Image (cartoon, helix red, strand yellow):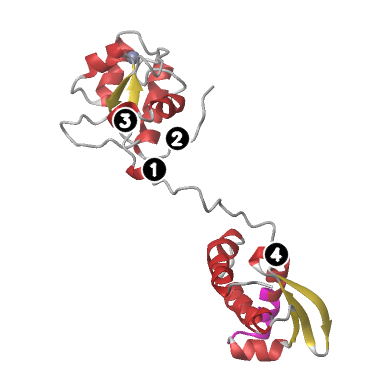
Amino acid sequence: MESSWDSVYADIEDLLAPQLALDTWERTLYYHLLRHTRLKGIASAHFAVGPLSTGLPISDFKVREVLRSLDAKGCIRIEDRSRHGHLIHVVLPSELPVLVRESREAPDIDIEALDFFSGRRYVEALLARQDDACFYCLRVISPESCELDHLVPQAERLDNSFRNVVASCHNCNKAKGSTSVVDFFRTRYRSGLLSEGELQSRLAVLAAIQSGELVPDIHRLRG
Ligand SMILES: [Zn+2]
């Protein structure tokens, strides 16, 4: 038996409904079936389609469709169909091994709020995001010797998020100054440090970083 309906309700909202992509009707019907089975201490009960459709209210056709879909998703098991209606076994979230539970102990880290510049705390994650190459000239760099660089200079906007901090070699860091990133890529290209293809791919990576698509993996362990 479930000891706490609080946790059942939380599991339905946090795990079952989102992970099995329950729509409004599936949710509504599931709660209704739950009310008349598990909440009474029984696992299965007979449900006639007529009263279900009147109570919700939706058409008989829709009730059958939603029941089939809940059955397919594993939230219920239709054990029998007879003149009494459907014999329905209602499954609790704790009985569905397919649901993924995140460890409750893991601290929630809001990566958007992390400072990737101060203290070089995430330098390894930043380097991994760049395949251990200088963001501007693609020379190989290391966590010990690389510089951290703001895409949009600090003077213009204080932004130490992963969307604005990259790792670079010492030369690029010194040379970039207040030049805009795109212009600076072009100087690297003109100096022969980047090929035409590399310039194009740098611009694509730049866009991915600034849009937040390329998130550094801060949990990554490097050996
Ligand atoms: Zn460089």
Tell me which amino acid carries mark 1.
Ile
- At mark 2, the secondary structure is loop
Label 2 vs label 3: CA separation? 14 Å
Label 3 CB less than 8 angstroms from ligand 1:
no
| Horizontal side of residue 178 vs 21, given as left or right | left
Work out whether 164 lies above or below 137. below
- At mark 1, the secondary structure is helix
**Callout in the foreground (2, 3):** 2
Task: Give the residue furthest to the left.
Answer: 155
| Horizontal side of residue 158 vs 96, given as left or right | left
Q: Quadrant of residue 218?
A: top left
Q: Which residue is mark 1?
A: 111
| Place of residue 138 in the rendered image (x, y in percent of width and height, measured from the top left) | 40, 15
Residue beneath the point at 16% across and 34% down? 156
Residue beneath the point at 28% across and 15% down? 172
Label 4 vs label 2: CA separation? 33 Å
First along the sequence among labels 2 and 3: 3
Can you tell which mark lies on residue 95?
Answer: 4
Label 2 CB less than 8 angstroms from ligand 1:
no
First along the sequence among labels 4 and 1: 4
Q: Nearer the viewer, residue 59 or 161?
A: 161
Q: Which residue is mark 2?
A: 218
Do the residues under discs 2 and 3 have CB atoms within 8 angstroms? no
Can you tell which mark lies on residue 129?
Answer: none
Question: Magenta span covers which residues?
Answer: 57-66
